[in-house]
Image: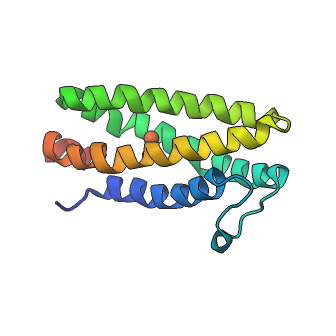
Amino acid sequence: MKRHDKLKKLSREHQRALVVAMALKYGPNPPQQLDWPAEPDKKRIKFLEFVDAELLRHLQEEENTIFPLAEAYSTTGRRLCVTLGMEHELMRKLVSEIRTAQEPELSELLIDFGLLLEQHIREEERELFELMPEIVPPFEMAEL
Ligand SMILES: [Fe+2]
Ligand SMILES: [Fe+2]
């Protein structure tokens, strides 16, 4: 089924976030073609630039727009958004820890964040974004 413009926009942001997740989850050995620093302090700087420029707003946008609709129109959607919302909270908590962490915790937190971010995006793309067009009436999607 053709995806709504709002979901397409969020999916484009997911593609960028997946690159960040890859750069983080391999710890000291980020895939070379990503061109990310391996050194934890430098990696943190690049990571926080992405968080502050894009990720925190992305989480808020999902919570303000698509989560309430998915919750309103289906039990599955409600269950899914409870989990996804808890993951958003966990990501925010990890970000604030990452801002001030020292080694060796910093390296571990960056890997944890990468794994969580990747898994979260897969859930949204494979479950929530597939479900939305089936449960939310077109007029509601048009309002987004
Ligand atoms: Fe999300
Ligand atoms: Fe998302």
Could you tell whether 100 is left or right of 6 in the image?
right
Residue found at the far bottom of this picture: 33
Establish if 121 lies above or below 108.
Answer: below
Judging from the image, the colouring scheme is: rainbow
**Residue visible at 53% across and 40% down?**
116
**Residue visible at 33% across and 39% down?**
66
Residue 4 in view in this figure: yes
Residue 57 in view in this figure: no
**Residue visible at 43% across and 29% down?**
85
Establish if 6 lies above or below 112.
Answer: below
**Residue visible at 71% across and 60% down?**
29
Q: Position of residue 58 (x, y in %)?
A: 50, 45
Give the image quarter of residue 20.
Answer: bottom right
Q: Position of residue 5 (x, y in %)?
A: 31, 58
Count the labels in the image: 0
Q: Where the N terminus falls, by quadrant?
A: bottom left
Q: Position of residue 36 (x, y in %)?
A: 72, 64
Q: Nearer the viewer, residue 58 or 140?
A: 58
Could you tell whether 47 is left or right of 125 in the image?
right
Q: Nearer the viewer, residue 3 or 30?
A: 30
Establish if 82 lies above or below 141.
Answer: above
Could you tell whether 27 is left or right of 7 in the image?
right
Picture quarter with ligand 1: top left
Q: Nearer the viewer, residue 68 or 34?
A: 34
